[in-house]
Amino acid sequence: MTHSSPAAGSFLPVGSWTRPEAVALNRLPMTTFLREGADVLSLDGPWSFTLLDRPGGIVRCGTTVQVPGCWTMQDVGDPPQYTNIQMPFPGPPPHVPDEDPTGVYRRQVEVPADWQGSRVVLQVGGADSVLYVEVDGRAVGMGTDSRLAQEFELTDLVTPGRPCELVLTVVRWSAASYLEDQDHWYHAGLHRSVLLYRTPRVHLADVRAVADRDPETGVGQLTVHATTGEARSEGAQVRVHLDGAPVGRATARWEHRTNVSTNAYRFTGRGATVSAEVPGVEAWSAEHPRLHDLRVELVDADGARLDSVSLRVGFRRVEVRGHELLVNGRAVLIKGVNRHDHDPRGGKTVSRAAMRRDVELMKGHNLNAVRTSHYPNDPYFYDVCDELGMYVVDEANIETHAYLRSLLTSSEWGPAVLERVTRMALRDKNHPCVVMWSLGNESGWAPVLDAAAAWLRAYDPTRPVHYENGYLDGALAGGLTPPQSWRTPRRETDVVPPMYPSIEDLEEWATTVALPERPLIMCEYAHAMNNSGGDLDRYWAAIRRHPDLQGGFVWDWVDQALVQRLPDGTERLAYGGDFGDTPHDGPFCLNGVVAADRTPHPSLLELAHVVQPVGFAWTGGEGVRLTNEHDFTDLADVADVDWAVTVDGEDVAAGTLGRVPVAPGATTDVRVPVPPLRLHGRQVAHLSLRVGAVASWQTELARAQDAEPPAAAAGPGLPTRLALWRAPIDNETYGPRHAERWEQLGLPTAHERVQLRTETEGARVIHEVTVPDGWDDIPRVGVRLGLPPGVVAVDWLGRGPHENYSDRRAGTTVGRWRTAVDDWPVRYVHPQASGNRTGVRWLRFLDADDRVVLTVDDLDDLDVTVSRWTDEELAAAGHLEDLPAREHAYLWIDARHRGVGSGAVGPDVSAPHRIGPGTYRWSYRLR
Ligand code: GAL
């Protein structure tokens, strides 16, 4: 090792950050973290920080930063950078830029005096992207993989009770960056906690607890493998207690004692294995996350305690049987989302409260699964998933997207791949929430991935292995397309996890080509980019129709927007390019079903509805069939089943059916005592059912269509203009590039050339327009009206309350709603069309004194938008802050309005939700 100049304050083996094979030096093997309380010394807080322009280079900034924290979020002059597929710097691999921001973190540390005689270990929770460690100027070690903790033994380098200087140097760009080419913000720094911990010299180095449970008999089988540390205590025993009661013991081993030649075949390794049967043990599942306390002790030959650790375990069985992934014997439907560690202020540093909130929000929206895209998430996240109940696909920190099919085929990347996969499993093995291991994302295929999968299967036969990209690689090599390409037998995965498949391909797979021995679980679908989420109901109808389809993970959970402070002191939500980061991929990072501050987007409300665990179907008359989609919970244990009948959104009758027993997976028919209804004019009656906060449903009961309401005084004659365009949503700008095509057709100014025929009959306004041949798939056919000044609120009857489109409205109900004009549109970070409501029958516009200024009624279930911004303004704006403040608002009344789809990377808006040439006629009354 050579040392850089003392000014740099760090040791850096020359060029090691540019070497793919320089994975780690002197790093301890990964274990489950088992220490707590007084055995842990947190080093979180302020650290002195120097930013160099390159390893061992010139000082660019000297300051104090917070740990954990990305320095890219702490104003040190090195901002974050967002790219999707492309690398943030020029290659080719393993080349890294000469200018390579390098952070030197220093801190005086005093190991507690009472740690005298202990073993002392440094744990660095996450260093992006390469970490170098030194103590009092002495080199300790280095390591890569920014999303897993790295540990180094300091026992002989520190003196308890005396201060020492700890220096952690982090290099931003490295060969490892090529393995971390995920679609996300590139940050830098110590983004997870740093701590010291102690263990006794004779200690438990690791514990692996396998808690199996036979779903047929309910008998649990607990197997605890405890690894002993290097120091010996002959005759020591490992004892195991479950929920306080002793369950077994075994003699501890400290390797072979004599020479290798005589013991080569008898070497049993270090540690002890304790097994015990646990009859009648309660199962862990996402529905009932029952955890048990496990205590593992190491005692000496006289029974005196040498060491003891605790962890939580859950008894459950995960297996692939036939085309199903079974949890506790049930083919659970995977109602999942992909999740990045992301905080709008912290970047990759996410607080415990925020992680808990994420899981609570997911559970509150009927989700039961998370894929930790595309790297092991913060360790606390798994604790919360264990506790609150989520099925987790744990993904290794591997993505080589820019060099998808080539990088891993070079052998120098092999050690890093194996380290990343095995260390993830060694860290997370004890979490009942982890139901599958994933080898990573979008890294093509290479033999080392087969090797990694083989290691996982041998080390941990209790969980299947997941990897998507082998299918893509196989398809490209074999010229196959989905669903045929999913048939290729792949060694690196136990499930078929396609990305953004069309519903048609899924149906074809399920009905004609499915491989019986592989479940199909979409690793990504429904590209939730800003205004999006079309056809979620059709996906879930297909999933429920075919046992060969088992759900999937929506892309993705949270908008990766970052809070940026502007020179004038104000803040805005930023995306790629906003920090001057180049190259960048603009707003492509805004794909969340929740906003960066975790406000649910309408796509999450839709998702919550289509995956809800209770199904309803009208069987005619007063009959409704209830389906209980829970796997382990009777419907009677959830909540009462309540009903209501509304006429034009007003309640006319309501009642409860009380607790309705329906076994998991079963259906039952109930009778709802609907009162006789007398409807007039164009009234519509609906029946709604609700089961607590878990599920709701609405169906149209009856509709009167006898007479036209009487004509009223002539309308106020608001300026009206034809609208055939909308500010493109991101799912039509990217991918199918409709935005460009609509521009070429001249849709934004079509009102100047296409004739809108308007007649009035009293207060009734009737429009007719002919969309010319060749204008296939346009965004809307409607009119835009200027609303009178002073309008501040809207009262309406139609689908709501939130934004909905013809292909994303299953989660809405027909009702009477009210909202402020300012709250009608959704504030997507990247401005675009938003706020449509379908099925609208009337609207009333109110002023600040709640007086009705304008009534628009007698609409025939039309699409309506209200906004203070025009489509032109929305399309021109880069950020919400660019939009003008305006006194008056506009109203769009559309005969048809395009769906939202998933087009940027998935299926475009499906045929029934597109608008083509033809003559359209629609009407309403203005009063
Ligand atoms: C997938 C990828 C995700 C994300 C998404 C598009 O191909 O796995 O990380 O890039 O596309 O938003």
Image: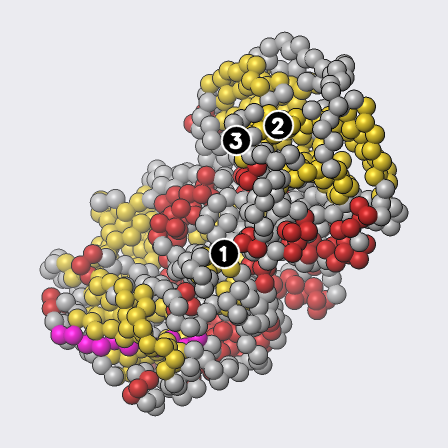
Q: Can residue 163 be found in the magenta stretch?
A: yes
Most foreground residue, 921 or 225: 921
Q: Is residue 440 above or below residue 291?
A: below
Residue matched to label 3: 848
Q: Residue at x 66, y 43 (%)?
A: 535
Query: Type of residue at label 3?
Result: Ala
Within 10 Å of disc 1 (Cα), the crowding (few <14, some 14-19, many 20+) is some
Would you name the residue on which mark 1 appears?
573
Please say whether residue 230 is visible from this viewpoint.
no
Coordinates of residue 635 in the picture (x, y in percent): 48, 27
Q: Residue furthest right?
A: 773
First to last magenta residue range: 162-172
Q: Which mark is residue 743?
A: none
Residue 20 lies, with reference to residue 79, above or below; the image says: below
The CB of the residue at mark 2 lies under 8 Å from ligand 1: no
Q: Which residue is mark 2?
A: 853
Could you tell me how far apart the alpha carbons at marks 3 and 2 are, in whole angstroms?
Answer: 10 Å
State which quadrant residue 568 falls in.
bottom left
Disc 1 versus disc 3: nearer the observer: 3
Q: Amino acid at mark 2?
A: Val
Of callouts 2 and 1, the N-terminal one: 1
